[in-house]
Structures are given as C-alpha cells and as structure tokens.
Image (spheres, helix red, strand yellow):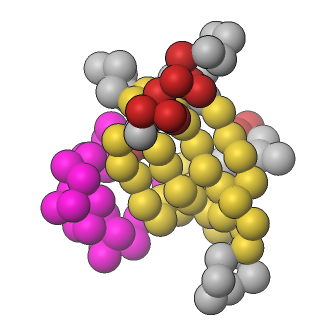
Amino acid sequence: MIDLNRIDGFDWDDGNREKNWLKHRVAIGECEATFFNLPLLFAHAGPARSQEELRYYALGQTNAGHGLFIVFTVRNNKIRVISVRDMSRKERMIYATTPS
C-alpha cells in the first residue's frame, strides 16, 4: 500500500485543480489537509485506463471535519490528486465505522 513517510508533497495538475474547485468546491488546502488527519482510509483502485500508473482512493476529513473522497496517484514521491469530492452517504457510513 502507500507509505506516507515516503511522500515529499503534492503535485497538482492545473486542469484538475480548477475542475475540483469548479465542480466540487474543494480547495487545494482542504484536500491536502485530509492526508494529515486521522482516520485516513486507502484502497487500491487499480491502474488508470490510459496509463500503467496505480490509482488509489482515500476517505478522510478536512481540518473542519468535512468528509472527502479523493482519487489520486503517486508520481515521483508526490501525491497527484486526480479528483476530489464530498463523500457519498455510503462512504460516510464506512468512514464513521472506522476506528481512529
């Protein structure tokens, strides 16, 4: 799985940065903060359709307690967010039953 101790930061694609704000109203800082708050759940999503890189899902919360669902990959020891949105009802239930 992912070893967050090996991550050097974040790498944002301008298109995804703008898309995530316009479509889902999630700011970059909120998304990044989610990776530092516990609990943080990861799941392997498999390779991207267009590339061989692995994609992951994460469920976590912002500093304000806002639950987010994040799709990301790791490139050169940096987290590259593909998409971020509010957790669905089912995702909130899963996250709520996770021990901290």
Quadrant showing the C terminus: top right
What kind of secondary structure does the magenta stretch mostly adopt?
A: helix
Does any portion of residue 74 appear in the rendered image?
Answer: no
Q: Quadrant of residue 47?
A: bottom right
Query: Vertical placement of 7 versus 34: above or below?
Result: below
Residue furthest right in the image: 1
Query: Vertical placement of 17 versus 64: above or below?
Result: below
Does any portion of residue 17 appear in the rendered image?
Answer: yes
- Residue extent of the magenta highlight: 10-30
Residue furthest bottom in the image: 50
Q: Position of residue 63 (x, y in %)?
A: 35, 22
Q: Position of residue 45 (x, y in %)?
A: 70, 60
In front of the other: 15 or 5: 15
Q: Residue at x 42, y 33 (%)?
A: 89
Q: Position of residue 40 (x, y in %)?
A: 60, 29
In the image, is 28 to the left or to the right of 74?
Answer: left
In front of the other: 1 or 77: 1
